[in-house]
Image (spheres, coloured by chain):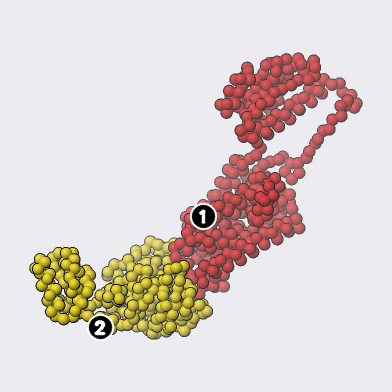
């Protein structure tokens, strides 16, 4: 579907995307996961023909992003990270406008957006600029879908959206996927990664790992422990100071710790030395890593 | 075609929804045309004059009343000495001092010769200069009247005199408004067209909607036409409102063909919109666009020959004014409105403006391509 993306994009001296290759299958819900500045938006802009790559080539639905950009524009939907519809046009006018410029009508593909549009329909005469954040996002999704695109690009669709709306949004994406639309979504939130079929963990324009979320977690090479105590800050200081520790970082209310030596005795030694330093109430448990653990580990490598 | 039609509909909808644009189209031209010609009038009036009359004779009285009745002067001081008159100048209450010496009438009659003293406050050079000239011509007039009274009428004048009679063509009463109003109208159309087109396109960049447009199959030229046509129409509307105002308020009716005027306007707007488009391709925000456009419009205004004749500018400035679209339209406006010029008189102007329009638009489109693939 999207195959063979290899490109270095060099904006001045800043390498935003460094020799990046990616292949997304048709009908897949693919996630680009990475912190701000990882190059996610640049990839989206190249694939949606808004930006020219310096090197390499990319295709979308078999069309070359440079030579056949017009064909691509007709069959992809793009929802940028920033709300960019006409604020001074109403909800309905925006939707009609985008339907018309794609040479279609709202009625023709209404079935695709029906579920989403019904939620914002009561406000259809309101100016888009006066909608709430969640409604703006729904309208933007409707506008990106109205021409029944084969591929949908969603650039950080859930950034700045509350937890409930985020959950709803991912459910909408799953239903769209069921309609056979390929979806490429980027997000800085690691917890959303598990909702994708496959993900690419990105950092500084490079792929750290590319696989299904499950496989990425399974590939975590060492045992991971969660430590908990009343004073988490001094606990972290003490764990880091210990020579047995490989890494230790705060994760929610726990500390996630890996050890240099995988043996059980090494864990016991660490616990013992921590108790000597006054951490009497220490709780520990072996846990399955989540994507964020994988990301942090990969980032360090 | 359908896309273009829809783009236009959207564009007009947005324009008319914008609360500040409609008043801009109608109120601004009316106000500017009412206010600016009065303020930009070069005919100097109300020059304040202080008179020092040492003579107090019927002749000096006659001279003074002749001066004040000319309408150009306002008698602000009637002083006993030059010194007190000078005080008035220092206080900025007088621009000119006229000193009539003692025995003015006596000497005038006896020796048929007299000298007057005129002093002018030259801080405002034009004012002092013109004031002096006006006063001089009134005095000459007075002089010849006196001569008429005293020199017996002979068949041939003993002195050979050359009298100059001039007749003012096209604007016989030297009405300054006839000269300024058409020019100001040009500036109005330029500002409305140039600024609004530039700002409108940059606004799409600023709020990101251009990204959304760029991922649609809309063709570049559709998008650009969709932007230019509305402002072309608005430019013509502003012009029409302005023409109505100058007819109703100043009684200016174009001598030449109105169709020709609008034909030239059409070509002129192409160049102005090209300018706006070009500015927009170089700016990322409305603020940048505004500053850049303002800088150029300022130069356009001052170097276009609207206020000061191009012929009296230095050579380099004259060169520049040839590249300014405003120059041509100001000239054409004056030619058609005041002189009733016809098509063959303005062909060179038309060619020039079309060339400028072509260069600006091509440049803008090339630059637009470069910045976004």
Image quadrant assignment for residue B55: top right
- Give the labeled residue for mark 2: A218
Residue at (51%, 62%) from the top-left corner?
A: B201
Mark 1, secondary structure of its residue: helix
The red one among the chains is B
Query: Residue B290 — which label?
Result: 1
- Of all chains, the one bearing label 2 is A
Residue displayed at 73% across by 30% down: B137
Asked if residue B285 can be seen in this view, the reply is yes
Give residue B263's position: percent from left, percent from top.
67, 59
Disc 1 crowd, CA 10 A, few/some/many (<14, 14-19, 20+): some
Q: Nearer the viewer, residue B253 or B146?
A: B146
Which quadrant is home to the N terminus of chain A? bottom left
Residue at 51% across, 69% down: B372
Q: Quadrant of residue B52?
A: top right
Residue at 27 percent of width and 75 percent of height: A297
Most extreme residue toward the right is B155
Q: Please name the color used to draw chain A.
A: yellow
Closest to the observer, A253 or B336: A253
Secondary structure of the residue carrying tag 2 is: helix
- Vertical position of residue B202 compared to residue B117: above or below: below
């Amino acid at each position: 579907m999207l195959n063979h993306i290899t490109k270095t994009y060099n904006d001045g001296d800043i390498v935003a995307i460094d020799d990046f290759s990616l292949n997304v299958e048709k009908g897949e819900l693919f996630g680009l996961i990475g912190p701000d500045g990882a190059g996610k938006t640049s990839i989206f802009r190249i694939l949606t023909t808004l930006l020219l790559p310096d090197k390499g080539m990319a295709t979308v639905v078999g069309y070359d992003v440079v030579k056949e950009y017009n064909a691509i524009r007709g069959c992809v939907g793009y929802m940028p990270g920033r709300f960019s519809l006409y604020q001074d046009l109403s909800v309905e006018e925006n939707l009609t406008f985008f339907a018309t410029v794609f040479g279609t009508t709202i009625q023709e593909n209404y079935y695709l957006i029906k579920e989403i549009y019904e939620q914002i329909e009561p406000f259809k005469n309101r100016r888009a600029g006066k909608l709430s954040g969640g409604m703006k996002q729904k309208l933007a999704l409707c506008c990106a879908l109205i021409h029944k695109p084969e591929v949908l690009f969603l650039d950080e669709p859930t950034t700045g959206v509350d937890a409930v709306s985020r959950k709803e949004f991912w459910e909408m994406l799953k239903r769209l996927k069921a309609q056979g639309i390929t979806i490429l979504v980027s997000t800085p939130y690691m917890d959303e990664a598990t909702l994708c079929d496959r993900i690419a963990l990105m950092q500084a324009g490079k792929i750290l790992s590319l696989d299904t979320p499950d496989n990425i977690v399974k590939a975590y090479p060492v045992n991971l422990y969660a430590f908990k105590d009343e004073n988490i800050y001094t606990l972290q200081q003490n764990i880091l100071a210990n020579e047995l520790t490989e890494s230790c970082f705060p994760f929610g209310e726990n500390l996630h710790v890996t050890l240099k030596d995988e043996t059980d005795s090494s864990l016991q030694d660490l616990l013992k030395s921590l108790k000597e330093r006054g951490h009497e109430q220490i709780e520990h448990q072996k846990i399955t890593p989540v994507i964020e653990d994988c990301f942090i580990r990969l980032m360090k490598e | 075609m359908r896309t273009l039609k829809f783009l236009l509909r959207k564009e007009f909808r947005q324009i008319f929804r914008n609360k500040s644009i409609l008043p801009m189209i109608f109120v601004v031209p009316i106000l500017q045309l009412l206010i600016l010609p009065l303020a930009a009038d070069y005919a100097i009036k109300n020059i304040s004059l202080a008179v020092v009359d040492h003579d107090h004779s019927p002749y000096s009285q006659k001279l003074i009343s002749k001066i004040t009745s000319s309408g150009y002067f306002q008698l602000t001081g009637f002083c006993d000495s030059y010194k007190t008159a000078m005080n008035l100048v220092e206080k900025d209450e007088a621009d000119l001092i006229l000193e009539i010496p003692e025995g003015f009438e006596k000497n005038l009659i006896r020796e048929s010769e007299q000298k007057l003293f005129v002093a002018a406050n030259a801080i405002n050079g034009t004012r002092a200069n013109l004031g002096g000239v006006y006063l001089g011509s009134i005095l000459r007039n007075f002089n010849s009247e006196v001569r008429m009274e005293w020199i017996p009428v002979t068949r041939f004048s003993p002195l050979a005199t050359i009298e100059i009679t001039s007749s003012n063509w096209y604007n016989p009463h030297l009405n300054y408004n006839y000269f300024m109003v058409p020019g100001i109208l040009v500036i109005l159309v330029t500002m409305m067209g140039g600024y609004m087109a530039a700002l409108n396109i940059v606004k799409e960049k600023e709020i990101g909607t251009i990204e959304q447009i760029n991922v649609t199959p809309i063709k570049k030229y559709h998008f650009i036409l969709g932007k230019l046509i509305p402002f072309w129409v608005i430019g013509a509307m502003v012009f029409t409102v302005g023409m109505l105002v100058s007819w109703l308020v100043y009684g200016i009716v174009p001598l030449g063909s109105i169709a020709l005027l609008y034909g030239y306007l059409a070509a002129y707007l192409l160049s102005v919109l090209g300018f706006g488009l070009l500015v927009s391709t170089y700016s990322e925000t409305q603020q940048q666009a505004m500053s850049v456009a303002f800088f150029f419009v300022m130069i356009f205004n001052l170097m276009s020959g609207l206020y000061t004749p191009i012929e009296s500018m230095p050579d380099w400035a004259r060169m520049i004014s040839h590249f300014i679209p405003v120059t041509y339209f100001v000239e054409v406006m004056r030619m058609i409105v005041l002189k009733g010029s016809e098509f063959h008189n303005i062909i060179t102007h038309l060619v020039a403006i079309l060339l400028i329009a072509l260069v600006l638009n091509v440049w803008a489109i090339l630059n637009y391509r470069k910045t976004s693939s």
